[in-house]
Amino acid sequence: NAGVTQTPKFQVLKTGQSMTLQCAQDMNHEYMSWYRQDPGMGLRLIHYSVGAGITDQGEVPNGYNVSRSTTEDFPLRLLSAAPSQTSVYFCASSYRWDTTYEQYFGPGTRLTVT
Amino acid sequence: QKEVEQDPGPLSVPEGAIVSLNCTYSNSAFQYFMWYRQYSRKGPELLMYTYSSGNKEDGRFTAQVDKSSKYISLFIRDSQPSDSATYLCALSPGTTDSWGKLQFGAGTQVVVTP
């Protein structure tokens, strides 16, 4: 049971390049989400998914795309990287039923856009 | 004005003291209230989860929710140096299609000195 895994751990991009941040979970959780964390701003939701084939926008979706073809995987695509996307990106998966709630975050991807 | 306000600290306390953390919020639709702990350069870790108003205790941790005042608190008793971390509050509307849309506070850095 690996929990939530993210790759890569670090990435440097040039402005205008595209890339995909990978996220996978092995807990069969329905809910998965992507956050970015910037100094002094906590975590802000980019996109989330309530199950395979279903995605929705969060607070800061511009410049990012997601898809969810399987329960396990939830990749985040940067279409054309900008310096404003320099941040730490966290993927999370969660489960809720009645009074039970579980949520696990991945270790993060540190992205620098020059 | 942010939907969730949290004092960034740092909050420095001596070992054994009680740590008191809080968040205020403006949206009365929030029904689920969470506290996370985040060590430096790691992903957040869910500590406590509370539905609606009231108190919840788990070991040295106590979470309180006062919906009438839109105020939530986390208390850490008998604090240890290993409690030194950033603590984030997060709130969710809790409806089926939106409960994964967490709004995070900016986080409070806590330092427990031996």
Image (spheres, rainbow, N blue to C red):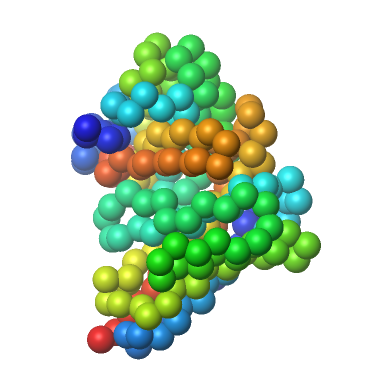
Residue A106 in percent (x, y) is at: 31, 40
The residue lying at 40 percent from left, 85 percent from top is: B17
Residue B101, placed above or below residue A53: below
Q: Is residue B30 left or right of residue A66?
A: right
| Viewer-proximal residue among B30 and A64 | B30
Residue A111 lies in what quarter of the image? top left
**Residue A9, horizontal then vertical, whole percent:** 21, 40
In the rendered view of the protein, which quadrant contains the C terminus of chain B? bottom left
Along the line of sight, the residue nearer the viewer: A46 or B78:
B78
Q: Quadrant where the N terminus of chain B lies? A: bottom right
Up/down of A28 relative to A37, above or below: above
Residue at image x 76%, y 51%? B28
Asked if one can make out residue A85 in the rendered structure from this viewpoint, the answer is no
Is residue B96 visible in this depiction of the protein?
A: yes
Query: For the image shown, how many numbered marks are present on the structure?
Result: 0
B114 on left or right of B20 = left
For the point 41% across and 71% down, the residue is B60
Residue B54: give x, y in percent of width and height.
Answer: 65, 61
Pinpoint residue B15: horizontal percent, then vertical percent.
Answer: 32, 85
Residue sitting at 46 percent across and 33 percent down? A95
Taking the image as shown, residue B114 lies to the left or right of residue B11, namely left
